Amino acid sequence: MPESRFMVKPCIVCGGREFRYWATRKGIDVVICTQCGHGRSELPETYATDIEEHYDDGYYHAMSYDRRWRFRVGRATRWLRYVAEIKPPPGNMLDIGCSMGYYLAAARRLGWTPYGTDISRHALKVANAHGAGTFWSLHPDGFPDWLPPLDVVTAAQVIEHLHDPIDYLSALRGHMVSGGVIYVQVPNFQKLLRQGPEKPYMGPPEHAQFFTIETIRRTMEKAGWEVVQYPKLRPSTIGPKLWQWLPELVFEYPRELTREANTRNGRLSNMHIMARAPQ
């Protein structure tokens, strides 16, 4: 394997230029920055413009995104209640990578005015059927003029797909109100490192970036966002009814207390982070 392949592009997080090989998937290498630990796929330069073709109806069916609607909306509602602790509704909320519209339905339920964007025209067609204002885009510079300033943005399982997440997140700040909040969810690279590349994992060409808890924070900060700690689990972030919050309190609260430790040691599959636009 030619060494030059690991020296072409600097690390997006720290600027380092030394990488070690980790794995190859679908003929594409995944390398890790030796300085900060961020992982990336060595994708071809055409990836940023060809990305749409990966997300047709076959992709969404294979990933089961077109099933378990009530469960997915309920899960989105839970995470949006965390956001509401920092930036309560009403207000304008945009879900980036809105898929079939789970976060849009949850946002409307909680009192926000929802908007959604995606690169999949198939997903947008389904989301539109639920009555949300949706639009196709690859980058915030392409957001429509009719989109109002945003109080809240959600991006669940999105940032890892981006060829240049810092450029994207920086441009996104221009669409926020002062103090607007973004909720980001990304896969935990520490878990992949813990289990090894021999285990099945989502990698290239779909995933361009592989974040640890440190590198996702540094990415947000480098893009100009102020990272904030999301609130701990309590009845107000779960729901008003006893049957909703009691099981969560019993089974989820211990995980919340150890979430950061379990993220660092690779026991949790996903990481959740919230950040605020400059005031």
Image (cartoon, helix red, strand yellow):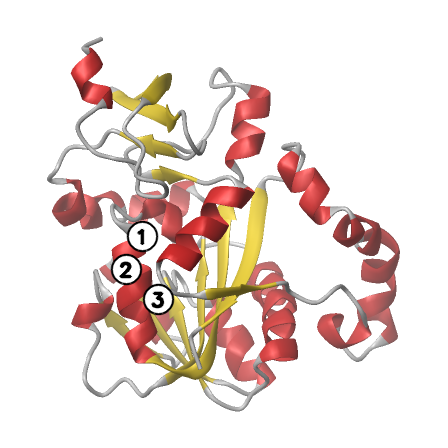
Q: Residue at x 64, y 41 (%)?
A: 263
Q: CA distance from mark 3 to mark 2?
A: 25 Å
- Residue topped by disc 3: 126
Q: Given the image, on which type of amino acid does mark 2 rest? A: Tyr
- Residue 20, image x, y percentages: 36, 18
Mark 3 crowdedness (10 Å alpha carbons): few <14, some 14-19, many ≥20: some
Q: Residue at x 52, y 20 (%)?
A: 199
- Residue topped by disc 2: 168
Q: Residue at x 18, y 70 (%)?
A: 141
In the rendered structure, are the residues bearing label 3 and label 2 in contact, judged by CB atoms less than 8 Å apart? no
- Between 15 and 109, the residue placed more toward the observer is 15
Q: Secondary structure at mark 3?
A: helix
Q: Earlier in the sequence, mark 1 or mark 3?
A: 3
Quick check: can you spot residue 37? yes
Q: Quadrant of the N terminus?
A: top left
Q: Given the image, on which type of amino acid does mark 3 rest? A: Val
Mark 1 crowdedness (10 Å alpha carbons): few <14, some 14-19, many ≥20: many
- Residue 103, image x, y percentages: 49, 69
Which image quarter: residue 110?
A: bottom right
Q: Quadrant of the C terminus?
A: bottom left
Quick check: can you spot residue 64? no
In the rendered structure, are the residues bearing label 1 and label 3 in contact, judged by CB atoms less than 8 Å apart? no
- Residue 162, image x, y percentages: 29, 49
In the rendered structure, are the residues bearing label 1 and label 2 in contact, judged by CB atoms less than 8 Å apart? yes
Relative to residue 226, is residue 40 drawn left or right?
Answer: left
Q: CA distance from mark 1 to mark 3?
A: 26 Å
